[in-house]
């Protein structure tokens, strides 16, 4: 394989062309108005006045050896409706031997001449839509010998074969050096305008693959998503909407000429013939796109189901496993994953992301794209949004707390502000309020169509204004994991990524509807709780054990406490931007007894204890205390001494302080010196409340002064 020429028309003054021919008032110009919009700034625009020619020529394009061939590819646009029954040369390689023309009401035709001078042609069945860029490729092969009739040609439009000609004796006709003309070079009609850009010549279809912009990153995005649509006016209109609203590159639109209007097909073989075979051919001819892509969007009007062994299978689940032999109910290796996977990681597991946008009308299908865009504009889901689920364990879980969204049981709801409806059972209504991100029905036979209201998923999509949905198309649904689905959305994954991780099987019955690229910005602000066994230094600040919303004033926590051990619960505030403060605040100390009953919060110990002797044989003791977060408020304090033994007597306080004002932080008491045989007494204080005691504060010593000695009289006069 080899790319022989690539002409992008960016060189000024037709620098990439050998000649410019403009007859009469007809023109061919380098124009920004004719540029292919996804690359470069200049294209070629031909405007015909009368029947005069206007074209450019590139000489010495290639010389074909016997049996060899090459391909010519280019982007083509007809800005205004062409005149009827016109004859317009698009390109020519070798004089009158190989050309493409627009004729018969704007249809493309490939025409070849044999050695006898006879012309052979094949035509594309669809007329070229006015104003729409299409990628055209023509292939010509020279006969292998003067007597062989194996010359041939083929026309491709937007990656799919549009007809072929074979059995030609063109050995002598294609003997010599070829050239290419682009423009109006023969038999044109007055007033015709045509644009050309990105012209490639190569020895294989893959050589002339149309330009596609390089992806912005490693994860799924529009530049990695192939859009599948029927080759019909509605299909092309939906594709154009994906191009404008999802920024899908034009080269990633796969038109399916064999797709019927039926939503559900009789068997897998029919699905192959209508969808998979053309998709395979499309990707085979575009190896760069095939290597980059990791997702499919099944567009409006494309078949969405097929029956296998009496069970209705979905197109999204089958295309999750595209490129491998169909095997109903294949285990999904990404089931329940909660970390994002790159495009290469997805493809390495022989998986693709796949969602479907279909509806009863084209307008409603477009509306699903619009709703996803509306959700993506939110910097965060409103704090009024609610997640509904009948799974009480999930609603109470840490995984659900991470979402920082209010929850309720779906069976009880009237659905105001229902952003998420997960695992539908017993819903009485779905109203049109709130963000309406997604509705999931994991029951039996709940999503056998997306084109009429027949279940809660389609009701949500077609009547209640939801942007996406998921369900199952058969009586034996497999698992749909809410934790994986919501957690991936929380960390910034797309809807397609979250949906793949949520389904237990591929090649099966799960149906995923909505824009594959939709993301959801959950509320970030709130509080994170952390736990440690022991003291503050033992808190695991890397793994929160609970999450709270900013407005939460109370919450029920399910914590892994160890019996008989003291646990420390820490709290950190998180800003609206998701930035967590870096404090080590302790909210509460938690301790259980041997029967796992929660003990009261501990008391902090007094500090800055001092003692001194004051007149009248008293001791003045002073100390300070604070009640940190997570501790109990003291009801009083006990003062202990060592009674002269050197060991504090903790059974009998020498003084009890009671009725301490809650606002007090310094305490001073005076009491008589206790009886002691020693002249030094040791003093300590601890807090008390409801049978609890704190640790002792600092032990201080105070020396008791001795009484003065009786004066001694000297011998002699004692008067």
Image: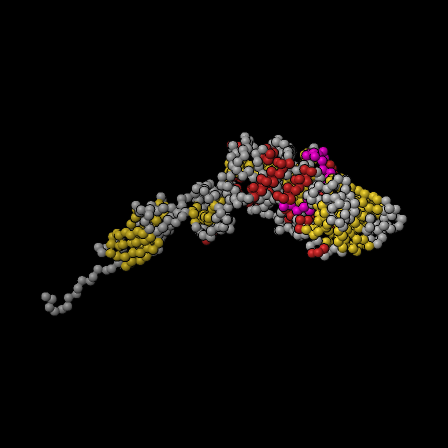
Residue at image position (85%, 48%) is: 170
- The residue located at (20%, 61%) in the rendering is 708
- What is the quadrant of residue 240 in the picture? top right
- Residue 18 picture quarter: bottom right
Task: Give the farthest residue toward the bottom.
Answer: 716
Quarter of the image that includes the C terminus: bottom left
| Residue visible at 72% across and 50% down in the picture | 28
Is 710 left, or right, of 503 in this rendering? Answer: left
Q: Is 484 or 355 nearer to us in this picture?
A: 355
Residue nearer the viewer, 202 or 688: 202
Q: Position of residue 10 (x, y in %)?
A: 69, 54
Which of these two is toward me, 596 or 156? 156
- Whether residue 265 appears in magenta in the rendering, the answer is yes
Query: x, y (%) of residue 640?
Result: 31, 52
Residue in front for this viewpoint, 231 or 339: 231
Residue drawn at (60%, 38%) of the image: 367
Residue 694 visible within the image: no
Tally of marks: 0
Where are the magenta residues, as a range? 247-267
> Where in the figure is residue 606, as x and y percent of width and height?
35, 52
Is 108 placed left or right of 452 in the picture?
right
Residue 247 appears in the rendering: yes
Q: Quadrant of residue 166?
A: top right
In the rendered image, residue 40, in percent from the top left (x then y), is placed at 67, 52
Whether 678 is drawn above or below 239: the answer is: below
């Amino acid at each position: 394989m080899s790319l022989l020429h690539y002409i992008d028309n960016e060189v000024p003054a037709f620098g990439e062309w050998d000649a410019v021919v403009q007859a009469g008032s007809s023109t061919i110009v380098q124009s920004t108005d004719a540029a292919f919009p996804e690359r470069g700034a200049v294209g070629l625009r031909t405007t015909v006045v009368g029947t005069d020619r206007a074209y450019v020529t590139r000489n010495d394009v290639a010389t074909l050896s016997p049996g060899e061939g090459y391909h010519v590819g280019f982007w083509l646009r007809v800005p205004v409706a062409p005149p009827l029954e016109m004859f317009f040369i698009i390109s020519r390689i070798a004089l009158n031997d190989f050309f493409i023309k627009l004729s018969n009401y704007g249809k493309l035709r490939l025409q070849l001449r044999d050695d006898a001078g006879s012309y052979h042609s094949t035509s594309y069945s669809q007329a070229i839509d006015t104003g729409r860029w299409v990628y055209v490729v023509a292939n010509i092969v020279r006969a292998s010998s003067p007597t062989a009739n194996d010359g041939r040609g083929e026309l491709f439009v937007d990656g799919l074969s549009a007809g072929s000609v074979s059995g030609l004796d063109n050995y002598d006709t294609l003997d010599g050096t070829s050239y290419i003309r682009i423009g109006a070079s023969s038999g044109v009609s007055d007033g015709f305008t045509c644009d050309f850009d990105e012209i490639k010549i190569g020895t294989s279809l893959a050589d002339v693959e149309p330009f596609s912009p390089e992806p912005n990153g490693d994860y799924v995005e529009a530049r990695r998503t192939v859009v599948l649509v029927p080759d019909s006016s509605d299909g092309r209109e939906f594709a154009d909407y994906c191009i404008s609203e999802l920024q899908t590159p034009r080269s990633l639109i796969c038109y399916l000429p064999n797709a019927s209007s039926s939503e559900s097909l009789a068997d897998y073989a029919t699905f192959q013939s209508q969808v998979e075979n053309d998709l395979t051919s499309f990707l085979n001819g575009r190896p760069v796109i095939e290597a980059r892509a990791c997702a499919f969007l099944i567009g409006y009007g494309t078949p969405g189901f097929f029956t296998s062994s009496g069970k209705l299978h979905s197109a999204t689940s089958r295309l999750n496993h595209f490129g491998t032999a169909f095997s109903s109910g294949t285990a999904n290796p990404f089931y329940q994953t909660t970390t994002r996977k790159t495009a290469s990681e997805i493809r390495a597991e022989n998986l693709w992301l796949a969602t479907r946008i279909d509806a009863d009308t084209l307008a409603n299908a477009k509306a699903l794209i619009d709703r996803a865009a509306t959700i993506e504009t939110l910097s965060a889901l409103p704090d009024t949004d609610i997640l509904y689920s009948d799974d009480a364990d999930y609603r109470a879980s840490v995984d659900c707390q991470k979402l920082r969204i209010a929850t309720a049981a779906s069976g009880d709801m009237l659905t105001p502000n229902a952003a998420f409806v997960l695992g539908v059972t017993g819903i009485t209504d779905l109203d049109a309020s709130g963000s309406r991100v997604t509705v999931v029905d994991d029951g039996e036979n709940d999503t056998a169509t997306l084109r009429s209201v027949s279940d809660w998923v389609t009701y949500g999509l077609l009547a209640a204004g939801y942007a996406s949905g998921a369900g199952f198309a058969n009586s034996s649904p497999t698992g749909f994991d809410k934790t994986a689905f919501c957690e991936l959305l929380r960390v910034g994954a797309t809807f397609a990524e979250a949906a793949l991780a949520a389904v237990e099987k591929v090649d099966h019955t799960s149906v995923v509807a909505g824009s594959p690229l939709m993301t959801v910005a959950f509320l970030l602000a709130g509080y994170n709780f952390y736990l440690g066994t022991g003291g503050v230094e033992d808190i695991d600040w890397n793994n929160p054990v609970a999450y709270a919303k900013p407005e939460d004033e109370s919450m029920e926590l399910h914590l892994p406490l160890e019996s008989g051990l003291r646990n420390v619960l820490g709290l950190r505030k998180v800003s609206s931007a998701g930035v967590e403060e870096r404090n080590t605040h302790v909210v509460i100390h938690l301790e259980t007894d041997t029967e796992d009953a929660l003990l009261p919060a501990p008391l902090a110990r007094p500090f800055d204890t001092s003692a001194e002797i004051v007149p009248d044989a008293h001791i003045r003791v002073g100390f300070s205390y604070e009640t940190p977060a997570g501790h109990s408020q003291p009801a009083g304090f006990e003062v202990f001494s060592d009674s002269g033994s050197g060991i504090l007597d903790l059974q009998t306080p020498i003084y009890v302080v009671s009725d301490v004002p809650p606002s007090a932080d310094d305490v001073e008491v005076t009491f008589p010196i206790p009886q002691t045989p020693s002249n030094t007494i040791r003093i300590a204080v601890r807090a008390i409340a409801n049978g609890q005691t704190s640790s002792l504060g600092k032990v201080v010593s105070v020396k008791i002064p001795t009484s003065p000695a009786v004066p001694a009289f000297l011998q002699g006069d004692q008067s």
